[in-house]
Image (spheres, rainbow, N blue to C red):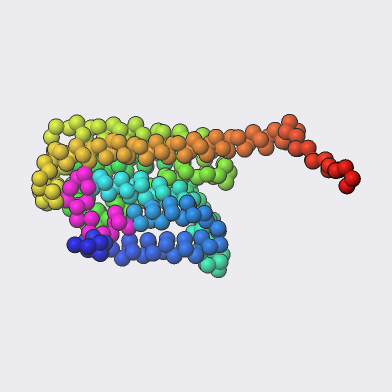
Amino acid sequence: MNLLYWLEPWEPSPTVVVAILCAAVLFLRGARRAHVSVPRRIAFWFGLVALYVALHTRLDYYFEHEFFMHRLQHLVLHHLGPFFIAWSYPGGALRAGIPFRWRQRFVNPAMGTKPMRAVLDTVFHPVVAVVLFVGLIYFWLFSPIHFKAMLDWRLYRIMNWSMVIDGLLFWWLVLDPRPAPPARLAAGRRLIIVIAAIPPQIVLGALIFFTPHELYPIYSICGRAFTWLSPIRDQQIGGLLLWIPGSMMSVFGALIALRHWMRLSARARLIEERARGHVKSPPQSVPRFEPGG
């Protein structure tokens, strides 16, 4: 088995291919005009490739047949991939990648409609953002719902896409480096919401880890990919993946939000001091005259 074998999709999905390809093309076109730095480009491509690997490779077989692999998939779809894409701050590049006529005729009018503004105002509300981010994890891990989602391929894909979209919205809100406005939230509130998302993830991960009986029998019914791994051990590893790496991603997000807050606060103070005249302009240099010059 070589790399091409693992990159071959277990269940081909035109939706995944089109979505990833469109994002890649728009970023390639727009990055030339928006002058995106090399670190931002690396972050974007890492996040996009991570999403593709978690959605459209042969690894999907293992995601469907082991609970801890399923949790690893959602760690990538909900945390890692969207985190790096949002960290690259690709909005300007993606917008620049859309042809100007399309932006004027389709994108700008669509974004300016009242229904679209209402939807964005709702999903980017700080309370709604936290509830959606944590609530989707709880919802899809509720045992009866999880059982149905792993049996129905349509519900399975809805589950995965909901995690991707919600992850992009949440991390886009939290990691926005701009002041408010134009950012939707002030830097301090961004820090608060990402910290608020940490305890519920820890609680759920610990609950799954310490539960002594099998919570997700669907993997035993459909057949496990790793027969040498007991159901309880599989469940415990899955709980740890939610408990530790999932929470650590939120900690990293909080550190970045804190950095933005400190930077923006220092800039605001400097602007305010200059406006009040407390910061004097540096004295201009006095020309020196050498003897005999």
Q: Quadrant of residue 271?
A: top right
Q: Is residue 108 visible?
A: no
In the rendered image, the residue lying farthest to the front is 292
Q: Is residue 246 visible?
A: yes
Q: Main secondary structure of the magenta part?
A: helix
Task: Tell me if 180 is positioned left or right of 84 in this view.
Answer: right
Residue 45 pos. (x, y %): 41, 56
Residue 112 pos. (x, y %): 54, 56
Task: Tell me if 37 is positioned left or right of 6 in this view.
Answer: right
Residue at left 26%, top 40%?
241
Location of the N terminus by quadrant is bottom left
* Residue 214 covered by magenta stretch: no
Say above or below: 161 vs 277: below
* Residue 60 covered by magenta stretch: yes
Residue at left 19%, top 56%?
61
Say above or below: 216 vs 20: above
Which is nearer the eye, 281 or 26? 281
Residue 236 pos. (x, y %): 19, 37
Residue 68 pos. (x, y %): 21, 44
Say above or below: 28 vs 196: below
Residue at left 88%, top 47%?
293
Say above or below: 254 vs 41: above
Which is nearer the eye, 45 or 222? 45
Tell how many labels. Answer: 0
Q: Magenta stretch?
A: 52-69
Residue at left 28%, top 63%?
13
